[in-house]
Image (tube, helix red, strand yellow):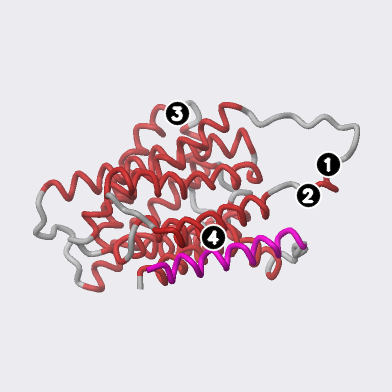
Amino acid sequence: MGSAFALACAFFWAFAVILFKKAGESFSPIALNIYKSVVAMALIGLTMLVMGIPFFPDVVPRVWWILGLSGLLGITLADIFYFSALNHLGAGMVAVVECLYLPSVLGFSYILLGERIGILGIIGSGLVLCAILVGAAVPLNDLKPGIIRKGPNLWGLWAGCLAMMFVALGIVIAKNVLDQVDVFWATFIRVTAGVIGLVPVVLCHPERMRFVRELKFSKAWFNALPATVSGNYIALVLWMAGMKYTTASRAAILNQMSTIFLFILATVWLKEKMTAQRLAAIVLAVAGAYLVIFNS
């Protein structure tokens, strides 16, 4: 069940990335972050009301502060560094930096949770990582002779690495707590903490009035809303469920399949060319996911 949730999360997140590409034409990164977080909090809260899930369950205070810290690390801080990396590196290089998410989760889950994934899991995770690197790499025939290509921005690389590490640490520290609470409630607390953490960031930002103008109702909302529903509501809940019902290591490996799903969706929906390079990446990723799912 956990593996199915993790794979479904990867698909819905890839679907959301396609939609966010359009939404990003009208929103700045921080404004879009505010929009998606607030809408996700409202949707999850409404779901809890419909399903009769209490907002104040009988849990010890430790559960509250762990989930709150998880949200601050995995949403507030991670998003700040992620969007900084996106601005300095561009989407292509950030896709490669995102590969750090998997080893970060594996490392933190080993240190904090004592998880081990076995030899097949190691091989499977290696195949998924190789698949992403192969798929995201610049084809050799795209490198024109006589042109000196600039190296990646060092701050962008550091920001991207920090973003992935905060995302990984945020979810790993919440792993044991997830076994004790409802998935929707846990997701709601993390998102709420993330939104609260964004408030001082926005208030102290020199372009805060620009964010206010961007967040006023406009046609751009109709692009951002389906992206938010897919990525920050459905995918986020599935992500938490995957972490709850399987090991953090296995869930993280399957979550990285989102890049592979993105290749497929870009081919089907955006009519991007399915190159031999991307096809090889898909084959590697499917083989890796198979080994992870059926690793005892």
Residue position marked by numbered label 2 in the rendering: 139
Q: CA distance from mark 1 to mark 4?
A: 27 Å
Numbered-mark total:
4
Q: Which residue is found at the position 35% from the left and 37% from the top?
A: 199
Q: CA distance from mark 2 to mark 3?
A: 39 Å
Give the secondary structure at mark 2. Answer: loop
Name which quarter of the figure residue 273 lies in.
bottom right
Q: Which residue is found at the position 34% from the left and 56% from the top?
A: 41
What amino acid is found at the position of numbered circle 3 in the picture? His
Residue position marked by numbered label 4 in the rendering: 258
Give the secondary structure at mark 3. Answer: loop
Q: Earlier in the sequence, mark 3 or mark 1?
A: 1
Q: Position of residue 215 (x, y in %)?
A: 48, 46
Q: In the picture, which quadrant includes the N terminus?
A: bottom left
251 is higher (above) or lower (below) than 99: below
Give the secondary structure at mark 4. Answer: helix
Task: Indicate which label's residue lies in the foreground, 3 or 1.
Answer: 1
* Label 1: few (<14), some (14–19) or many (≥20) C-alpha neighbours in 10 Å: few
Q: Tell me, yes or no, whether the two marked residues, 1 and 2, touch with CB atoms within 8 Å.
A: yes
Between 172 and 122, the one nearer to me in the picture: 122
* Label 4: few (<14), some (14–19) or many (≥20) C-alpha neighbours in 10 Å: many
Name which quarter of the figure residue 47 lies in.
bottom left
Give the magenta part as a residue range: 276-296
